[in-house]
Image (tube, grey):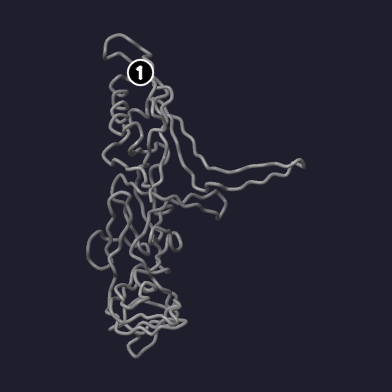
Amino acid sequence: MTGIVVLPSVIVPKGIVLAGLSGVHSRQNERSRNQGGFGTVNVIRDVTLRAWQVGTGPMDLALSEQLFGIYEVTDAGAYAMLYEDPIDSTFSVGNGALQGYLAGDEFGAVGFGNGTPNYGVRKIYTARGSALTRARALTRFIATPSLFRGGSPVTMGAAPGNAAVSAGPSYVIFVADASRTVTAVAVGATTQVTLATSIPGFVVGGRLWLQDLAGADAALLNNLSHEITAITGGGLNVYTLATNTAGKTITAAGTGKKYPQPDETLTCAGSFFVPVQFRDDNLNWDLAIAGPTNRRQVVIPACFIDEIREA
């Protein structure tokens, strides 16, 4: 089973929104109340999804034809399109953050590095006067977002410390700050990895990325970041990792790399689209004003578009 394919060139025209719009934010909770009046709630879906009803007022024939056009090319919602929410389409350094993304899962604290190359873009929502927050995943951008590491701009490019934004669904991919050859691996309750030379900037509590190691159990270390619990050796190039490899077979080969660290903030700013699809197979309409073609107006009373999630 695969997700819904998004057609990135199909964008809901802003003029349709101006003809009339209402929306809803939805969750899914299971609620009950006993005879004593005490209620309970079980959270079924803890992700907010948005939906909009467009075309609720009369619109020019030309605008309605645009809506009919995207209905046709998306096969009535079999494919998704992009939509700029008129009340929520921007994020700033104050509420835009990156979160680690590893093997399809979120990883690490929102707004901080975690020693990995890949990050998703998040918009942070808060309740005024509260420290509670909720992060929303953003995957489609109107333009390349601005990235900041420790408050300093991140350059887009291929040099060490640079980053790139992948095609949609979009993620931020960092170039390693530095890399070194792994010359020795000592397995155990903690793991010691020796690099050819030290990598500047690592501290205890930081995270070392490893890849291309050999041996039957190399997957325990490869393509993962590992917490550093000690840095030793004459050249400060021996890194003790919290990862347990006792009794495993892992041999020296491959590379150690440094990516954004847990003590580095990762923020961002920009604007975004929401991937959406038509809710229904049918698109109803009424001719509200007849007459010459340039005066005709169409009402589309119940056209709903629903937000979809992308992994």
Residue of label 1: 298
Name the amino acid type tagged 1: Val
Is 37 on the left or on the right of 288, as rendered?
Answer: right
- Residue 192 lies in what quarter of the image? bottom left
- Crowding near pointer 1: few (<14 within 10 Å), some, many (20+)? many
Residue at x-position 43% and y-position 62%: 107
| Disc 1 secondary structure class | strand
Residue 126, x across and y down, in percent: 51, 50
- Residue 185 lies in what quarter of the image? bottom left
Q: Is residue 27 above or below residue 111?
A: above
Q: How many marks?
A: 1
Residue at the farthest top position = 291
Q: Is residue 305 above or below residue 167?
A: above
Nearest the eye: 123 or 183:
183
- Residue 285 lies in what quarter of the image? top left
Residue 36, x across and y down, in percent: 77, 42
Residue 22, x across and y down, in percent: 46, 30
Nearest the eye: 161 or 151:
161
Residue 239, x across and y down, in percent: 38, 82
